[in-house]
Amino acid sequence: MPRFFSRSHFEAAAATIRERTQLEPKIGLILGSGLNPLADIVEDGVAIPYSEIPHFPVVTVEGHVGRLVIGRLEGQTVAVMQGRVHYYEGYSMAEVTFPVRVMQVLGIESLIVTNAAGGLNPEFHTGDVMLITDHVNLIGMGGLNPLRGPNLDEFGPRFPDMSEVYDARLRALARQVGTRANVPLREGVYVCLAGPSFETPADLRFLRLIGADAVGMSTVPEAIVARHSGTRVLGFSGISNVLPVEGTSPAETTHEEVLEAGRMLIPRLEAIVRGMLRAL
């Protein structure tokens, strides 16, 4: 696997996908831990295992199926990533974000990103859906920015603006959809860490201090690469557990807990995603 990718790598992957379906997706959807069943609602779907797509990274984490599903949903043609890869699995940032570039080559105009996250805001509850208003790219500040390396000018500029990663109009639409679907939306800032270890009490104290409302190990690299090319981004965090505040009893965080919360979040996120697609 090359250290960095060129347009030809993305084109090769896209060509293999086009051999399997005539559909041309306009909306991409990335499903996080425990949220894979959302792909089952896609109609006339063609499911392609990542292992059958050239250069595509293969998932290794429980709760991530590892298939690209292309089909129709609520009148829209969608490309759904049924699971994602993470930096902590041993992949480079170029590999982690490779699928986003492929979806851009396929023609997507908007990207809806979901994840399971730990709640840092003490007002949050397990099972809440948080609309991502902004992010803190801690993993990127440490040098792991997905745009590191040769810039692909055909995708975007060397120094892209990130003042509004998560599209304001899509967020306004999401609020309306949440109200109509009777799914209350929390709102807040998502912070991305490298993982795979969960946070210490000192970590949590620091993350709250810098203004983060939810913490996870994904989404931010994908959103940055999407915005680099002008793709509109909308992000949702499913709050899988609420992390203890200082002075309260510490609670162990487990991946099983995250997956269980995902099952509770699925109907809420399905209502939001369906509503967004209808509104778009």
Image: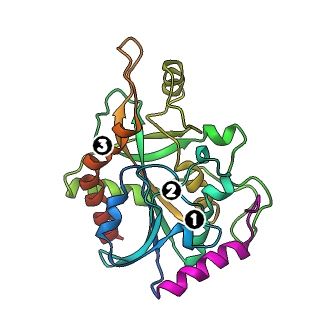
Where disc 3 sits, the SS reads helix
Asked whether 251 falls inside the magenta stretch, the response is: no
The vertical placement of 278 against 63, above or below, is below
Residue at image mark 1: 99
Query: What residue sits 43% from the left and 34% below the top?
Result: 213
Q: Identify the mark at residue 243; answer none if there is no mark.
A: none
Residue 85 is situated, as x and y percent measured from the top left of the image, at 55, 54
Query: What residue sits 51% from the left and 22% below the top?
Result: 200
User: Mark 2 to mark 1: distance in Å?
Assistant: 9 Å
Residue at image mark 2: 84
Where disc 1 sits, the SS reads helix
Residue at image mark 3: 260
- 3 or 1: tag closer to the N-terminus: 1
Front position in the image: 13 or 79:
13
Amino acid, disc 3? Glu
Cβ atoms under marks 2 and 3 closer than 8 Å:
no
What is the magenta segment's predominant secondary structure? helix
Front position in the image: 247 or 156:
247
Image colouring: rainbow
Bounds of the magenta span?
Answer: 1-21
User: Mark 3 to mark 1: distance in Å?
Assistant: 26 Å
Asked whether 3 falls inside the magenta stretch, the response is: yes
Cβ atoms under marks 2 and 1 closer than 8 Å:
yes
Query: What residue sits 29% from the left and 74% below the top?
Result: 74
Locate the C terminus by quadrant: bottom left
